[in-house]
Image (cartoon, rainbow, N blue to C red):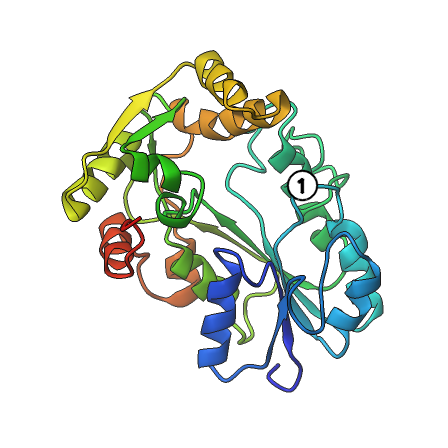
Amino acid sequence: MTEHPILVTGGTGKSGARVVSQLVRKGVAVRVGSRSAEPRFDWTDRGSWDTALDGVKAVYLVPFEGDLLTRPFVRRAKELGVERIVLLSGRGVDVPGYAGENSVAGRILGDGDGDGDGDGDGDGEDAVRDSDLQWTIVRPAWFAQNFSEGFFLDAVLAGELRLPGGDGAASFVDAEDIAAVAALTEDGHAGQVYELSGPRAVTLAEAVAEISEATGRTIRYVPLPHEEFVAELTAQGWPAADAEDFADDVGPIRRGMDSHLSDGVQRATGRPARDFSEFVKSAVASGAWQG
């Protein structure tokens, strides 16, 4: 595997950058898939796919958040000699009712229509399963890093996290654990679906309380009804469809569908998943909330 570079799409993102780092530490040749890399990789420019895939035998595939491009990309990768795909999917893609009826994530990651029936018509998991390549699917819960470098960072810095999550809990998973699973290069992971979570579930209120205690900041969580949350986002200039989609993404937390624990980190790596408190300590040490 080390004789050929591993292409990491989304190679500068939350999970991709960590996959790159962990592979480099193992001495594995890596090709960062991004528009600023050399060779350049741009999901929207299919002419860049071939150069990025040249000589590649394995790919960490972070689906494009836009057009449905996973299936054509996997098809082209196979034509160019790729043998293994590790797909970043998401929790709940196989659970009817988890995602909203018009969920973008459901279309990109799952079976295309979000009904969880596994009927093979989707762009994400279906595309790699149908490819006849060696595949591994990684289904993480909510990233803990959403609080430090993602969706929730600005709200945390502002001192108020307003979400339609009710009093539900989520078993947030550390992106370092996601990368540790995705960066495994030894045999034995083909055909595996790894559901990843942290070792305990925390409510949104508990999460910001831990961050408050560790940083000395005053941060509070304000649960909002779905409609009020959407209205606030649209008043801030969000397109209505994007606001609805964000609210739908948070909905499973409110409905109690994200609190269960998954054993994928332990199964794949042989060690326990990192606790949310460990993530908080690491984020504080890195200066994530000094802004």
Number of numbered discs overlaid on the protein picture? 1
Can you say whether 131 is above or below 189 in the image? above
Q: State the image coordinates of residue 288 (x, y, percent, origin top left).
A: 31, 53
**Vertical placement of 16 versus 187: above or below?**
above
Q: Quadrant of residue 28?
A: bottom right
Residue underneath mark 1 = 108
Q: Quadrant of the N terminus?
A: bottom right
Residue 131 pos. (x, y %): 77, 57
Q: Secondary structure at mark 1?
A: helix
Of 118 and 159, the residue lying toward us = 159
Q: Is residue 131 visible?
A: no
Res 106 quadrant in image: top right
Q: Residues within 10 Å of mark 1 (few under 14, many from 20)?
A: many
Residue ID at (48%, 12%): 227
Residue 118 in view, yes or no? yes
Compared across the picture, whether 28 is left or right of 278 comes to right
Which residue is more in the foreground, 215 or 92? 215
In the image, 155 versus 27, the foreground residue is: 155
| Left or right of residue 218: residue 71 | right
**Does 278 sit above or below residue 180?**
above
Identify the residue at horizontal 57%, vertical 63% (top origin): 11
Q: Position of residue 242 (x, y in %)?
A: 60, 28
Residue at 71% in and 75% down: 56
Q: In the rendered view, does 139 fall on the left or right side of 6?
A: left
Residue kind at label 1, given as amino acid type? Ile
Residue 290: image location, x then y, percent: 27, 51
